[in-house]
Amino acid sequence: MLVLLRPPPFRYSLPLERPYGQVEPVHRATTGPRTSPRRPASFAYDWLCPGSHEGVTTSASPRKIGRAQNISRMCLVCGRDNAFGLHARFYELAPDEAADAGAELVGIFTPREEHQSYPGRLHGGVSSAILDETIGRAILLRQPDTWGVTVEFSVRFRRPLPLDEDVRCVARITRDTSRLFEGSGEILLPGGEVAVEATGKYIKQTLGDITTKDFAEREWFADPRDLPEDVEL
């Protein structure tokens, strides 16, 4: 005798209670850095349904730039003389009460054709590199003589990044102890959407722990490029 068994009900663990494209309000503490900015409520769907958030934007607004951080000679991300590098610029942003944001760091670079993965799209490894660098540099906002060495790094890719626009990466410190610090960062599209986001944990070291004593004199210097007044984030 053939017995037909009824299959158990299929259950989703993803947040189905909100329609696609609806943005969840982000509740931030009145003090301290923001830890989860610009995240749509149904972000877990992005890998299942590419394009499900297309057209959803957050309001971009100008942030005042305080100063530019130093760059180096041959770093892959910020190296002035590295022909294969990103030649990124890093600007320190003052706290912005209107944006409910603490002190943050923004890294900016212009992608080139050699930075692509699929045609017209920025390679995910390049996105990870600029995020890692920007989060790691954010400790200089608090402790100018402290350098971060990556211990853990986690990245989520949510939207493709085109090659024909500047890449803007914003980061901040989320936890700071005597030995370690943690941070988060996002790469933003022109409309304010998050394309890539990451978190990282870094061990604090002095420059002498990492490299030779003359590095600061030979390899670490002020960025000679013009300093803009603000940046859209």
Image (cartoon, rainbow, N blue to C red):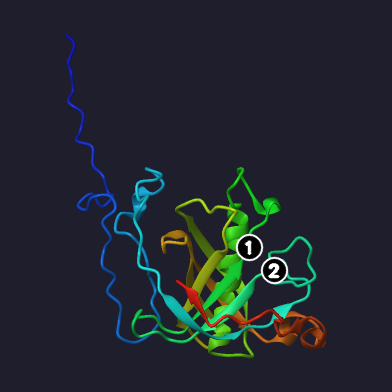
Who's the residue at 34% across and 55% down the image?
A: 56
Of callouts 2 and 1, the N-terminal one: 2
Who's the residue at 49% across and 86% down the image?
A: 177
Residue 60 seen: yes
Q: Are marks 2 and 1 in contact (CB under 8 Å)?
A: yes
Q: Residue 159, percent across and down?
A: 46, 52
Specify few, some or many for label 2: CA neighbours under 10 Å numbering under 14, 14-19, or 20 or more. many
Quick check: 144 left or right of 154?
right
Quadrant of residue 50 in the image? top left
Q: Amino acid at mark 2?
A: His
Q: Secondary structure at mark 2?
A: loop
Distance (Cα) linking label 2 and label 1: 8 Å
Q: Residue 165, percent across and down?
A: 57, 59
- Give the total number of marks visible in the rendering: 2
Q: Residue furthest top?
A: 1
- Identify the disc placed on residue 110: 1
Who's the residue at 48% across and 78% down the image?
A: 172
Q: Nearer the viewer, mark 2 or mark 1?
A: 1
- Identify the disc placed on residue 87: 2
Q: Give above or below for 206 relative to 53.
A: below
Q: Give above or below for 24 relative to 91.
A: above
Specify few, some or many for label 1: CA neighbours under 10 Å numbering under 14, 14-19, or 20 or more. some
Q: Amino acid at mark 1?
A: Thr
Quick check: 205 left or right of 159?
right
Q: Residue 79, percent across and down?
A: 74, 71
Who's the residue at 34% across and 87% down the image?
A: 31
Q: Residue 184, percent across and down?
A: 47, 71
Quadrant of residue 2 in the image? top left
Q: Secondary structure at mark 1?
A: loop
